[in-house]
Amino acid sequence: MTLTELMIQYPKPSIILIAFLVTLVMTLVTKKFTNQSRMKELKDIQKACQIKLKGNKDNPQEIEKAQKQMMECSMEMMKHSMKPTLITLIPLLLFFMWVRTIFTGVLSGWFWWYFVTAIVSSIVLRKLLKVY
């Protein structure tokens, strides 16, 4: 029995497994190609800014300063996340084209199964692998 035949015979478990594996690969690529210590530092800065925002509701200057710092952190985090995105973009698009041809006639809501599984997997894997 070929892989495609197995996927057609067991569509839901197949799409769940595919979503998990794709998410695992993307998480590992993200961990490898981003500076994890800098990403953690940026997240900590953002948390500190959120605390400042809550504590300085009456001080517009402090609010503006904290918002500016949060925006700078967000921009830097986005810059760091672009490299893994560019690395995985084309292989992922080709992979999705292949998966779509298999599941379109077999499992009408395959994308939603993939989407939900990928989100849950991403949350769990990022916590387990400490990816920021």
Image (cartoon, rainbow, N blue to C red):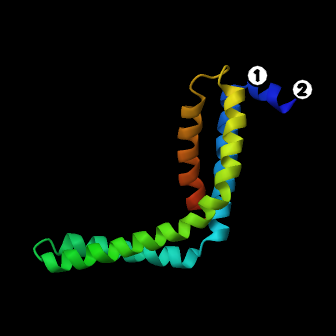
Asked if residue 130 can be seen in this view, the reply is no
- Binning the other alpha carbons within 10 Å of mark 1 as few (below 14), some (14 to 19) or many (20 upward) gives few
- Please give the name of the residue rendered at 56% of the width and 64% of the height, measured from the top-left corner: 82
Dot 1 or dot 2, earlier in sequence? 2
Q: Residue furthest left?
A: 58
Q: Residue furthest right?
A: 1
Asked if residue 107 can be seen in this view, the reply is yes
Distance from label 1 to label 2 (Cα)?
10 Å
Q: Residue furthest top?
A: 105
Q: Badge 1 is on which residue?
A: 9
Vertical arrangement, residue 49 with respect to residue 127, above or below: below
| Quarter of the N terminus within the rendering | top right
- Please give the name of the residue rendered at 68% of the width and 37% of the height, measured from the top-left corner: 97
Q: Amino acid at mark 1?
A: Gln
Residue 131 is situated, as x and y percent measured from the top left of the image, at 58, 65
- The label shown at residue 51 is none
Query: In front here: 1 or 79?
Result: 79
Vertical arrangement, residue 90 with respect to residue 47, above or below: above
Residue 46 is situated, as x and y percent measured from the top left of the image, at 37, 72
Q: Badge 2 is on which residue?
A: 1
Q: Amino acid at mark 2?
A: Met
- Please give the name of the residue rendered at 27% of the width and 76% of the height, measured from the top-left corner: 66
Residue 51 is situated, as x and y percent measured from the top left of the image, at 27, 73
| Quarter occupied by residue 42 | bottom left
Image check: 48 left or right of 81? left
* Number of disc labels: 2
Are the two marked residues, 1 and 2, in contact with CB atoms closer than 8 angstroms?
yes
